[in-house]
Image: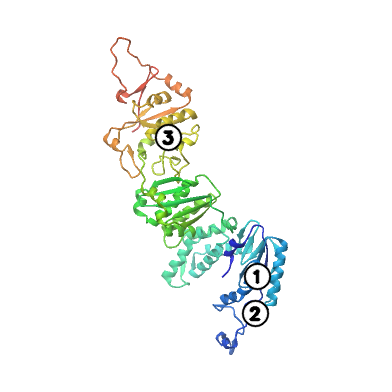
Amino acid sequence: MEGLHLLKQLVQNKDYMIKIDLKDAYFSVPMSKQHRRFLMFTWGEELYQFTCLPFGLAPAPLLFTKLLKPVVSLLRRLGLRMIIYLDDIIVLNQTQEGILRDRDSVLWLLQNLGFVINWEKSVLQPSHTMEYLGFVINSLELKLSLPETKMNHLVQSCRDLIQQQVSSVRTIAKVIGKLTSSMQAVFPAPLHYRHLQRLQINGLLTGKSYETMASLDQNCRNDLQCWIDQISIWNGRAIIAPAPDLVITTDASMRGWGAVCQGVHTRGLWTPQAATSLHINALELKAAFCAVRAFIAKKTQLHVHLRMDNKTAITYILKMGGTRSPILLRIAQELWDYALQNQISLTAEYLLGESNHEADWESRHYQDPSDWKLNPHVFQTLNTQWGPLEIDLFANRLNTQMKSFVSWFPDPFATATDAFQIPWSDLKGYCFPPFSLICRCLAKVRKNMATIVMVTPAWPRQAWYPVLLEMSCRQPILLPPLKDLLTSPRQQVHPLAQQGSLQLAAWMVSGKPYLQKEFQNKLPSYLAPTPGAKALQPLTIVPGHSGVTGVLKDKLIHFAPLCPL
């Protein structure tokens, strides 16, 4: 049958509309005498039979719709854009002259065919807004919304239910029916009646009757309160979905997740707990959530289209949850809550597994040799001495030391992506970069005139070591040689740390010359050997021996201990 779902194919911006209502539509259809005996009923001691198509007969809507098909077909061949739902007809046209001409054509044909027009309910003056089938169509904004009276009635139903300690399953089902009927005009409607649906299902399973009494839990009450508080904000949904601003392809494995968007690849590992406790359907849904957060960052007002190879996850996204799995419902609600907070609309489509090879590869081949995390206790001690630090400049969601961090690839919880693309000048940053990027980090500190805390190996033979000495503005700290000084997201210990052959140091470096000079002026002088005298034994070949870091401009720099350990 036709209905409001056809609007997205028919309505155009700034359309004029009129509405025609047929009076006693079913009663205008006579029944043949030989079939009237099937439509008999008794009232008191009298026996009656319908001579026309009655209300309440199961096939009546389909029969009446088929009866009008030839009429609608003729009008559409004449170029009329229209929707007919039983006895309610709406006609659309781009011009006022055109809609008046179409109105007259429809009225003339219907009346000549014997139908009676309900002039009181019909709206024959062209308008850009029209109430049709319980919703208000606005062709200027291309939105569908609830009328004020219907919205108030829905809110009152929620208030009545939330005030009851226990309620019958029938009453709960009635409220759910009213909430679901608003879906076409209230975009996030399904997000806030799933707990009520689960309560209804459980009540029917246990009591086997709609008269079974059930008690509303806190989740149900929260959902009802959301409707009461937010319905006026939620009311109004776009008739035509906008074209996607971003198309993201995602996939998940038991090891991690991967995603691709506009040629940019990203990935991540699951926590050991998630990898062992969650079903692959839940991981696929989490992968979509991670991908959306990673690629959206701080953008708002977008339409994001997801392409996935898991039909269950797609269903939970499109339907904003479900009743079969509480875990999938929770993940779907988290995804949609994040999207709505950022004014993002989501759609999803199924992608065959063999067509999803890029995201699939990312989810299964997560290898990052620099993905190591400093022992949290060591970091906290360092943060106490030199902090408070506010942002981790080289991290991901599994190894970050702070809530705010910058990732190398797009990451669902990162503050930003690629530390070299953001200014460091005003950051209280912690920097534990891949060793190959130490030189680049020091250049960035100098260029931005920044002051950060940096962790590096104590390798005096490296080209960047003299630059560290030069840019230091505090006494460097030698980190303790713990076996678990560095660990991976899967709790693997760094082999060099485990062997005790990796010595790390923390430095506070600055690109501000006056801070460097203040520190250097506090250093003790280094007595170099005079010509011809026997050279002193080099103290900086093995860092930390005798607590010596190095020599800068005839000044001796010592390592300080990390206290308290």
Q: In which quarter of the view is residue 101 placed? A: bottom right
Q: Are marks 2 and 1 in contact (CB under 8 Å)?
A: no
> Residue placed farthest to the top in the image?
532
Q: Position of residue 3 (x, y in %)?
A: 58, 67
SS at mark 1?
helix
Amino acid type, label 1: Leu
Q: Position of residue 176 (x, y in %)?
A: 52, 65
Label 1, residues with CA under 10 Å away: few <14, some 14-19, many ≥20: some
Describe residue 406's horizontal placement relative to residue 44 as left or right. left
Q: Indicate whether 70 appears above or below 158.
A: below
- Mark in front: 2 vs 1: 1
Amino acid type, label 2: Ser
Q: CA distance from mark 1 to mark 3?
A: 71 Å
Residue ID for mark 2: 28
Residue, x 66% and y 75% (percent of image)?
23
Amino acid type, label 3: Tyr
- Mark in front: 2 vs 3: 2
Mark 2 or mark 3, earlier in chain: 2
Residue ID for mark 1: 75
- Mark in front: 1 vs 3: 1
Residue ID for mark 3: 430
Describe residue 223's horizontal placement relative to residue 70 as left or right. left
